[in-house]
Amino acid sequence: MLSLLQSNSFILDSLSNFVHQSGIGLFFAPGGWKMAVMIGIACFLLYLAIKKQFEPLLLLPIAFGMLLTNLPGAEMFHSDFFAGGHVHWEHFAHGEAGLLDILYLGVKLGIYPCLIFIGVGAMTDFGPLIANPKSFLLGAAAQLGIFATFIGAYALGFAPNECGSIGIIGGADGPTSIFLTARLAPELLGPIAIAAYSYMALVPVIQPPIMKALTTDKERLIKMKQLRQVSKTEKIIFPVVITIVIALLLPSAAPLVGCLMLGNLMKECGVVDRLAKTVQNELMNIVVIFLGISVGATATGDSFLNVKTLFILCLGILAFSAGTAGGVLLAKLMNVFAKEGNKINPLIGSAGVSAVPMAARVSQTVGQQYDKSNFLLMHAMGPNVAGVVGSAVAAGILLAFLG
Amino acid sequence: MDKFANVGWGEMGLMTIIGFSVVFVVLVLLIFIMKGMGSAFTRQKKAKKVAELGSVAAAEEHEAISDQELVAAIATALKLYKSDLHDRESETLTINRITRAYSPWNSKIHGLTQLPEKH
């Protein structure tokens, strides 16, 4: 009888231990509710990616990474291994690191964003920008979003390094945002990546009202001159010149710009087709999976469920709107000094906020709402790719100031 | 963050102004470089054409005709314009059952002028 009771007590203890150690039991531990909420958010993001197709290529792995990191007891990601902005290698040496910790090293060391930039470069045609170099001005003006948000974030009480990371959302460039945030404010990586990619998907919703509000009917009907043809030699020289000039002026922007231009050179030179195809497809896809999962993994309950995240989401909208307005307003200003026949349709200014090629498509769509025979797409591609270079330069400047 | 302990509104404002200005300066510098490169290439291309075709006027005329992008843009514009002119239809298909009473007028047998032969 006694032995039966002892045996029952042992079984009860074992069951109790099992329940407490199980993931379900951990939901009821202090702070466990945050994980449950984060799993709900991850499922919502999965819904947005799959059903609404909001940047699904990135949002899906990000949301799944978020789901994995918030599964109680799975211990797949440890933010304390990267505390203080450094990698604590001793945990990796002792084999304590989970799968997501290992994948996150690529973000922390700035590898994934640069590899993605090689792929982006290999898929980008800089021809419209070479044909009309004035587009660089529109790309620069659209970086207003970055700096307006930088100051806006400071007004809301963020530390200067956090302001830099939040401001870069205005560059509308995911890899640049992740590259800079991993260096300046890694604890904000989750919310910033989600804000950047969600708002990029919402460019067709955010931009048109601002573009219409800042332009007149007459301006929207401006037809631009046909762009000149760009020779192959020019397209080959362009990435080399840009890399040298930017790396000499701003060494901190060299990793991003250098990788972007390497990819572009692979595409344009025509002698390494196999490499160009690999970076456009296989490499890009593999890195996107790793980047998405590991960025999502940083969105733990403690780092995500706070007022800062709400502020970041609000500032993200401000960043995109200010960037759009900056590009459109500078195009209007350029028209004041331009001769008749050389005028710019201000609708292409909004494309300066990177988000390639979505922002250029928005310029084309809005332009065609007013004149079916007005084709702005190729003209808008100039500021669009200039925006990629501009946001990489802005990231380099912020890194030099705050890194 | 001790590093930013002495950073106030003044420093943040200055960083914003300098940062935005540097973006402009770098990109304006690139404009000059690209413009210089572009005009050098255009001159070189024109000189080559002139040498090939004999005169400046002939080279310009040839350039205008061979501008394939222009042709492609016109063709696309025409296609889009024509597709826009197409009548909009309701795209609703309905199948209504109609009762047709027998009549010699719709009878096949009465419609045949020559009866088929049985073998």
Image: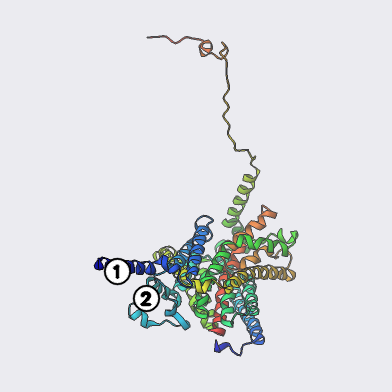
- Using the rendered image of the protein, determine whether residue B81 is visible from the camera's viewpoint: yes
Q: Position of residue B65 (x, y in %)?
A: 60, 55
Say the numbered circle drawn on residue A97.
Answer: 2
The verdict on a common chain for dots 2 and 1 is yes
Residue furthest to the front in view is: A1
- The Cα atoms of the two marked residues, 2 and 1, are separated by 33 Å
Mark 2 vs mark 1: which is more N-terminal? 1
From the viewer's side, name the closer residue of B42 and A5: A5
User: Residue at horizontal 53%, vertical 59%?
Assistant: A48
Amino acid type indicated by mark 2 = Ala
Q: Position of residue B101 (x, y in %)?
A: 57, 15
From the viewer's side, name the closer residue of A357 and B98: B98
| B71 relative to A256, above or below | above
From the viewer's side, name the closer residue of A396 and B29: A396
Tell whether A248 sits left or right of A221.
Answer: left
User: Residue at horizontal 56%, vertical 70%?
Assistant: A388
How many labels, in total? 2
**Would you name the residue on which mark 1 appears?**
A10
Q: Position of residue A389 (x, y in %)?
A: 56, 73
Identify the subunit bearing mark 1. A
| A368 relative to A195, above or below | above
Q: Position of residue A298 (x, y in %)?
A: 47, 72
User: Around disc 2, counting alpha carbons within 10 Å, would you say few (fewer than 14), some (14 to 19), or many (20 or more)?
Assistant: some
SS for callout 2:
loop
Question: Residue B39 appears in which quarter of the rendering?
Answer: bottom right
- Using the rendered image of the protein, determine whether residue A272 is visible from the camera's viewpoint: no
User: Around disc 1, counting alpha carbons within 10 Å, would you say few (fewer than 14), some (14 to 19), or many (20 or more)?
Assistant: few
